[in-house]
Image: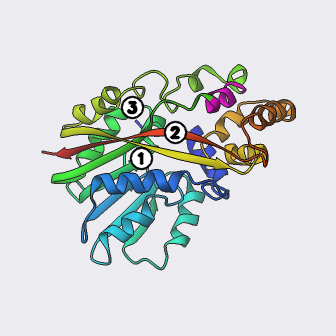
Amino acid sequence: MTTPKGIVGVFDRAAETYDDVGVPWFRPIASGLVEELAVRLGERVLDVGCGRGALLAPLASAVGLTGRVLGIDLAPRMVNRTAEDFLDLPQVEVRIADAAAPGLPVSSFDVVASSLVLFFLPDPAAAIRSWTDLLVSGGRMGVTTFGPQDERWREIDAVFTPYLPKEMLDARTSGSRGPFASDEGVEGPLREGGLIEVRTAHRVVEAVFRDAEHLVEFSWSHGQRAMWEAVPRREHPALRQRMVELARGFGNESGRFSFTQPVRHTLGAAA
């Protein structure tokens, strides 16, 4: 089973601003995963769904010049821009490949890492099985997903709800229900994929916005863009206004506000 073309297109269209609108978000989340995986000098690491390289930078530092980091993504613009960013790091390679079925040699990596990707895939357990095959015996895997959503962020997301098709209402990314709503739910696919010593580490990140308009800009720059694209264009101005009015209620005198977000780093080892 492959990654749906629709979500690939969303990220391709977001590539120009992805992780580049001044919000500390993907990088601190990714750094936490690298720390939990305890990546070492000289190791070979696969970054599944590398996006704009939030994981690639700390991974490259961890493995050093004697290691290797391969980042794969199915969005061509993401891959092109990210490859350009890492031209000066010879241990990093970025290429187009499907997260759901990477098509790489078995037993060719010491570590497989994937941050905020698993919930986009149509069959997470099958994806994990394919990633497990890529690990050497004793290799490690780590995936990051969201914990419970900040209630204020949930209020913002609810503005989109009347416009969203059924397939976008499963809430897998928000961590509010379904298989990604608990540690056990996320750990299940890793165990099904043949991993042992499965555990979950918890961290909290903070997304800081200078004002309400900054939140709108951020919402277009990542996966939430899919929600905007599900709304008829004629409705965009009114929806934007509702979003801004809500967000202004969260700000201080300068308009600045932040959302906190628990994240799960779920880890396991190959037998």
Sequence order check, earlier mark of 3 and 1: 1
The picture places residue 73, in percent across and down from the top left corner, at: 48, 53
At label 1, counting other C-alpha atoms closer than 10 Å, the crowd grade (few under 14, some 14-19, many 20 or more) is many
**204 left or right, relative to 104:** right
Displayed quadrant of residue 129: top left
- Against 140, residue 4 (above or below) is above
Name the mark on residue 123.
3
Q: CA distance from mark 3 to mark 1?
A: 11 Å
For badge 3, the amino acid type reads Asp
The picture places residue 88, in percent across and down from the top left corner, at: 47, 80
The residue beneath circle 1 is: 99
Specify the segment rendered in magenta. Answer: 152-159
Between circles 1 and 2, the one closer to the viewer is 2
Label tally: 3
- Against 58, residue 118 (above or below) is above
The residue beneath circle 2 is: 261
Sequence order check, earlier mark of 1 and 2: 1
For badge 1, the amino acid type reads Ala
For badge 2, the amino acid type reads Gln
Q: Secondary structure at mark 3?
A: loop
Q: Are marks 3 and 2 in contact (CB under 8 Å)?
A: no
Residue at screen point 43% across, 21% down: 178
Q: CA distance from mark 3 to mark 2?
A: 25 Å
Sequence order check, earlier mark of 3 and 2: 3
- Does the magenta portion include 156? yes
